[in-house]
Amino acid sequence: MPDLSVVVPVHNERDNIVPLLNEIASALRGRADFEIVYVDDCSRDDTLTILKTAKTQFPELRVVRHVAQSGQSTAVRSGVKTARGSWIATLDGDGQNDPADIPRLLAMRDESPAQIKLYAGWRIHRQDSGSKRFASRFANALRSRLLRDNTPDTGCGIKLFERAAFLDLPYFDHMHRYLPALMLRAGWQVKSVPVNHRPRGSGVSNYNNFNRALVGIADLRGVAWLIRRAKRTAVEEV
């Protein structure tokens, strides 16, 4: 079994697949025992065909597909459930996350206390439009004030976390934006790590500021409720 599974959710990302796969392989071959799990969230282009063809070039690659479009959080969870590694690294499929950051996250994990179960990427120099950066800053400030998750950037796609800890979290749509708060709720520790951020490789974003804001308000209230209702009890065998 691999030690690490790199999970990449994609929807209509045909032109970004092979370049990102090349970067993942270059970053990890010879440095980690890994697999790559791509989750095609029912793309309308030939993303799936390209992924199937790429399996001949990348023996580490595994591909799963949603039969109906279900969103990024569900795609991430499908990838984690499919993964065989005990630790998961996630990347957005648009090429904005740099796979070269994964070895640094692994090295930091090896030097850190076992209580830290999530290493969250922190985009210090974001390569997005001004409106997108402003909306993100506003959302991060509001979320931090309400949830007190002490995380400057929850929207970054590159993260490293323990598979078992993730699967123990409550699941809901858009949960990937609240992983730090949910990990803290479960009693684990979280560490934010500065990472590289790049312009989108090709294609167009599947999100806009308006639809993020609409779901974000309801999600914040729901996660705040979950945190208030959390209860952890130590268990001992007798």
Image (cartoon, rainbow, N blue to C red):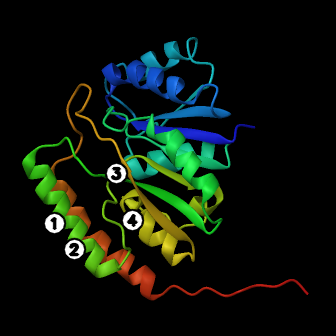
Classify residue 10 as left or right of residue 39: left
Q: Which residue is mark 3?
A: 156
From the top left corner, tell me how far across and down residue 60 is, in percent. Answer: 62, 25
Q: Is residue 2 above or below residue 49?
A: below
Which element carries disc 4, helix, strand or loop?
A: helix
Do the CB atoms of the residues marked 3 and 2 lie less than 8 Å apart?
no
Q: Is residue 142 above or below residue 207?
A: below
Q: Which residue is mark 2?
A: 142
- Label 3 to label 2: alpha-carbon separation: 16 Å
- Label 1 to label 4: alpha-carbon separation: 15 Å
Do the CB atoms of the residues marked 2 and 1 lie less than 8 Å apart?
yes
Considering only order in the chain, which callout, 2 or 3, is on the residue closer to the N terminus?
Answer: 2
- Label 1 to label 3: alpha-carbon separation: 15 Å
Q: Which mark is residue 138?
A: 1
Q: Quadrant of the C terminus?
A: bottom right
Amino acid at the residue labelled 4: Tyr
Which element carries disc 2, helix, strand or loop?
A: helix
